[in-house]
Image: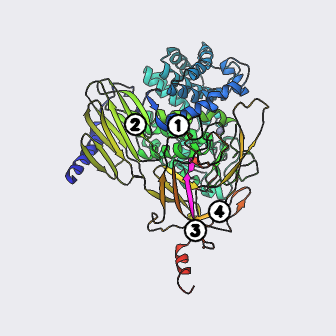
Amino acid sequence: MKNYLVLCLFISTLFLAGCIKNEVNINYKGNPAALYKNTYIKLPLGTVKPAGWLKSQLENQAAGLTGNLDDFWPDLVKSSWKGGDGEAWERGPYYLDGLVPLAYLLNDEHLISKVKTWIEPILASSRDSGWYGPLKNKDRWPLAVANKVLMQYYEASGDKRSLDVLTKYFRYLHDSKPDWPDKEWRGVRAMENAVTGYWLYRQTGEPWILETIESIQKNSSDWTTYYEKFPWDSAASADKKIPLNWGPDGLTAHVVNNAMAIKYPGLWYQQSKDERFRKAVFSGIKKYDINHGQPGGRFSGDEHLAGKNPSHGSELCSIVEYMFSLEELYAVFGENTLADRLELLAYNSLPGTTTPDMWAHQYDQQANQVLVSAAKRDWSTNGDYSNIYGLMPDFACCLANMHQGWPKFIESMWMATNDNGLALAAYGPSIVKAKVGNGQEVTVTEETNYPFNGSVKITINTIKKVEFPVDLRIPGWADSVTIKFKNKKVKVKNISTFKIKERWKDGDQINIDLPMQIRAEKSYNNSLTILRGPLCFSLRIDKEYKSVRINYDNFSYKGSMDWEINPTSAWNYGLLMNKANIMIGIKSTENPVSRYPFSDKGDMIWSADSGKYFTWTQDAPVTITTRGMIIPEWTMKNNSADVPPMSPVKPERDSEIITLVPYGCARLRITEFPVMDIVLMENLMKPGK
Ligand SMILES: [Zn+2]
């Protein structure tokens, strides 16, 4: 077995190092020779579909805000993007950037017919000049979003008009003067156009598209130098030097701009092939972690970059945009730390900031979130309503933009490899129907309750035998992964991708066992965050939901509610952890993932509420019990938990068993826990003391 293992690792390393270089996928359009050959190719919308709990999640989203919002929110009902006389800027395109993939991933006729009520007027709006969209919009920014909508719509529907509108618009950009000022969204976000630009180039091969992108890169905000120098670091934060304004410098400290811009040097790397741009991406991500890092893969910004204090917020737009950036970057670089982070965001930060039924969302989420209410908090620039779960807390950008999170994540879970195979980028229940080898279609089904459980079963269905490789991403947190296929069993350690190249027959399986050990990561003031697989865990806090109405615009709410949430149990716990072996006294319990005890709406998986008030009443799919201790001096400050006291903390009270639930299930939570001084405790417990 040992020899076999070594051989297997050797072969897989060979595959990764050598064979791929000159291969070209004949089934999906990768980058032509003028561009860098990306590691993976994103599959067209509709190729990867959700299954299991992820399908329920999308159904919840369809039954929640996404499927209903354009029936009652005036900015969408009257949108100029669909021929009305209302909002003509970003809200229509933002909404469609999520509605289009949701509709086609669920193959939901009602949602697809909704999509068409938007797309037809947009396609009809294309003018001779190449400009398109509402007559009254003169700004290029919303078109950067609308481009992505038309790209996805083309992939799902094959409607060539979409491709024509995009080609004409890129011709317009090519032939007109650069207009990408640093003080405007269209300037700081100009390279968002490159997502569609490179895609369009892959479709059409028109060389002038690359000239257009080069002009945008050279005439818009210089994010590469920004990531190299990173002026808004912890020192700037401590000195209160982060610019909290909406001018050119403030826009570089804006959380959503940062979450979008991290992909810009990586996008440009495809064309420049200059290592400087690759380095900028990875050093930028590291600098976010060091200076503004929060649990769940994100960085803070409420709504300017806000440091590491776990009571600072991250705006929902920054979560979905960071996810999209990572999805794009993973295709380019195939670097698994990017996909590890993508899973962290998808399985923690995204669900944690909406209600399980996806009828309400926050503007700002906090790692240590002990009170959800309309109140003054220490946000950098946001308003008093920002951490309420509701329809439109604070500015309404997130209400328009949140919809892309889940659908685009699912689209990116599988990608195509250059050697005509498939790559499993992010784990989760899914079905991919794709062309492999010499163009044969196969169906690959991934059955799993991941991220709640680490057992993954992949079944390949094919009409005739076909040889193709499967790249399996080995998560960075997984110590040792067992993979079984074709009567072989391999234990994989210390590699990031395991490539299996086999001749597959109908019904062949790959079984993967990802070890879900509990681990801890150091956070603010030496506090600890507990993780298991890609899930972060938070203290279960008893709570009382209070429905409130923050009626900004006086329109009908349909199913929507605004919620304040008050704690009804203590939250100020520290952990009793044995640093040498954190597994001592800590235990996880898996509950059934699929069950419908209270609701006729299907699973509401991201719930840990045992009350009787909501459609989402359901306990968490996995819980952790451990020992904790109240820290009396840890109290609230400005309506949030104060910073965790510096660990180790002197023990003062009796220890208790506490329960942790996944971050994404916890709408009140402590995620960065102080740690009690175990040595001091042991001394205190010695006889005679
Ligand atoms: Zn937003």
> Which residue is rendered at x = 58% and y = 68% of the image?
647
Say if 8 sits above or below 517 in the image. above
Hey, what amino acid is under mark 2? Glu
The residue sitting at the left extreme is 3
Q: Position of residue 188 (x, y in %)?
A: 61, 37
Ligand 1 lies in quarter: top right
The range drawn in magenta is 656-664
User: Dot 4 corresponds to which residue?
Assistant: 572
Q: Which residue position holds label 2?
A: 446
Q: Residue furthest right?
A: 554
Which sits earlier in the primary sequence, circle 3 or circle 1? 1
In terms of sequence position, does the residue under pointer 4 or pointer 2 come before the other?
2
Can you tell which mark lies on residue 647?
3
Q: Which residue is mark 1?
A: 324
Local crowd at mark 3 within 10 Å, few (<14), some, or many (≥20)? some
Q: Mostly what secondary structure, the magenta segment?
A: strand
Viewer-proximal residue among 536 and 209: 536
Distance, label 2 to label 3, CA atoms, is 42 Å
